[in-house]
Structure formats: structure tokens, C-alpha cells
Image (cartoon, helix red, strand yellow):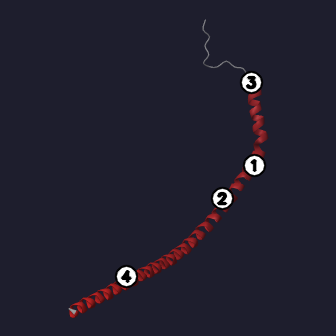
């Protein structure tokens, strides 16, 4: 009976050691998964920062050229406005005289399609 009880006791101890090893393996697996996740997040952050820098460079190049274009457009607009203003000042008097003469100097005439019906 003692040998049986000793055998059962050994089996229980072996089962306990196996259980402890299994728990330890699970803990190591959990730590490794956590470490792998942290490494992946670090790589993702680094990649994101690189792409963001590249994006910022491209955007600054594009925006720089757009600001030059907007300055050119602004300059051309001002030139057109000045040209139109000069043209207005130059022709304003003559156009007003012509318009007033057309309105004020009326010559009554019978229309050519008018027929006298008696």
C-alpha cells in the first residue's frame, strides 16, 4: 500500500510540476507576445514618422510653388486693374459725351415702314 501511495504521490508531484511548467510557458508566451506587439508598434511609429516627414517635404515643395503662382496671379491682377483704370480715365469723357448726345439730340423721323392708311 505504501508503494501505491508513494506512486500516487509521485504522480501528483509530476502533475504539479507539469502544471507549473505550463503556467510558466504561458507567462513567457504572454511576455513574448507583449514584447512583439511593442516592437511592432515602435516600427509602425517609426514608419509613420518617416512617411509624415516625406509628406511634409512634398507639401512644402508644392505649397512653395503655389505661393509663387499666387504671387504672380496677384501681380497680374493688379496690372490688369491698373490698365482698366487708365483706360476708364482715358475714354470716360468721350463715352459720356457720345451717350449724352445720343439721348439728348433726338431727331424725330417717321419710320420707314410706316404707312398712312386712309
Which one is in front in this view, the residue at disc 2 or the one at disc 1? 2
Residue 58 position within the rendered picture, expressed as x and y whole percent measured from the top left: 56, 71
Figure quadrant of residue 25:
bottom left
Q: Measure the alpha-carbon separation of dots 4 and 3.
A: 108 Å
Figure quadrant of residue 27:
bottom left
Is 31 left or right of 59, judged from the image as shown? left
Q: Which residue is mark 3?
A: 106
Q: Which residue is mark 2?
A: 73
Residue nearer the viewer, 42 or 46: 42
Q: Which residue is mark 1?
A: 85
Q: Residue at x 32, y 86 (%)?
A: 16
Q: Measure the alpha-carbon separation of dots 2 and 4.
A: 68 Å
Q: Earlier in the sequence, mark 4 or mark 3?
A: 4
Which one is in front in this view, the residue at disc 2 or the one at disc 4? 4
Q: Earlier in the sequence, mark 1 or mark 4?
A: 4
Q: Residue at x 27, y 91 (%)?
A: 10
Which one is in front in this view, the residue at disc 4 or the one at disc 3? 4
Query: Which quadrant holds the C terminus?
Result: top right
Amino acid at each position: 500500500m505504501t508503494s501505491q501511495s508513494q506512486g500516487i504521490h509521485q504522480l501528483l508531484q509530476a502533475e504539479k510540476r507539469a502544471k507549473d511548467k505550463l503556467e510558466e510557458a504561458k507567462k513567457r508566451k504572454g511576455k513574448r507576445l507583449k514584447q512583439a506587439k511593442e516592437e511592432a508598434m515602435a516600427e509602425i511609429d517609426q514608419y509613420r514618422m518617416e512617411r509624415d516627414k516625406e509628406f511634409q517635404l512634398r507639401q512644402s515643395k508644392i505649397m512653395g510653388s503655389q505661393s509663387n503662382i499666387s504671387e504672380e496671379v496677384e501681380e497680374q491682377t493688379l496690372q490688369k486693374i491698373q490698365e482698366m483704370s487708365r483706360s476708364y480715365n482715358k475714354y470716360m469723357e468721350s463715352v459720356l459725351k457720345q451717350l449724352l448726345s445720343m439721348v439728348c439730340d433726338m431727331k424725330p423721323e417717321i419710320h420707314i415702314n410706316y404707312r398712312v392708311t386712309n
